[in-house]
Amino acid sequence: MNLWQPLAEMFQVPWGEYAANLGEGLLRTLAYTLASFIGAAALGLLLALMRLNRLRAVRLPAVIYTEVFKNVPLLAIIFVTYFGLPSVGIRFSVFVAGVLSLVLFYAAYLSEIFRAAIAGIHPGQNEAAHALGLGRATTFGHVILPQALRLALPGTNTMFVDLLKSTSLLVTISAAELMTRAQLIASETFRSLEVYLVIAAIYFAVCYPLSQSLLWLERTIHAGVPLSLGRRRRLRLAQALIQNGG
């Protein structure tokens, strides 16, 4: 009985009263994650293509951007975006400032992942596509990019989960995400240890299944299993033609 008493005393927060707040915070966290990842992936791909360009005038700005944002803490970017820019007349809402900070930071890392993946495609793929009369845009979109995405999946998946966890830093600008809600609950209940243990468990309950799902997706794609219905129909049609021809 004495052994369990300290543990029982630890968990005394009326969580039923805060369930709605935590649910809203979690939804806000997911919104930050999705919006930021889409923006970071798009910007990261653009930067990767700039890094691979033969023109120095195109390549150099991407190199500078990548090196700067890889070596500046995310927290500093958040502070500059939300607290610093208003001093020069540029103001963003909390949501826009949070998403912009995450996009700027993670685009630098995703650009390196995408650049390595694109550069890892054998040059013969490009030459074969040109020999078939495909243009540069068609070659990149239908030959190079699909193969590069497979190579980029492990690093991209890791960045996605890491981005979700990094939304917790937005507590510094009261972004109303999960960690901000936890901070408010802790200030109201004075049960910091219990509150933050529960919040850590919620992050784990979200991140672990997500990481495992992304790992399954990665293995499925590397195994050559078609994911879209159109590809599956074409695969079945090709198999039927081979069997009939045999």
Image (tube, grey):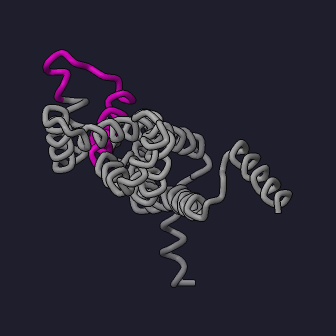
Q: Quadrant of residue 95?
A: top left
Q: Position of residue 116 (x, y in %)?
A: 32, 54
Left or right, 84 with reference to 38: left
Q: Residue at x 16, y 50 (%)?
A: 71
Q: Residue furthest top?
A: 89
Q: Is residue 163 above or below residue 101?
A: below
Q: Quadrant of the C terminus?
A: bottom right
Q: Is residue 190 visible?
A: no
Question: Is 168 contained in the magenta span?
Answer: no
Q: Nearer the viewer, residue 239 or 75?
A: 239
Rendered residue at 66%/50% (across/down): 227
Q: Quadrant of the N terminus?
A: bottom right
Picture coordinates of residue 133, whole percent (x, y): 47, 36
Residue at the extreme right of the image, as rendered: 244
Which of 192 and 65 lies nearest the eye of the viewer? 65
Q: On screen, 123 above or below 42?
A: below
Residue 20's x, y, as percent? 59, 41
Q: Magenta residues, as a range?
A: 84-109
Q: Residue at x 59, y 46 (%)?
A: 19
Q: Dividing the picture into quarters, in which one does residue 217 lie?
A: bottom right
> Is residue 124 at all visible to an observer of this figure?
yes
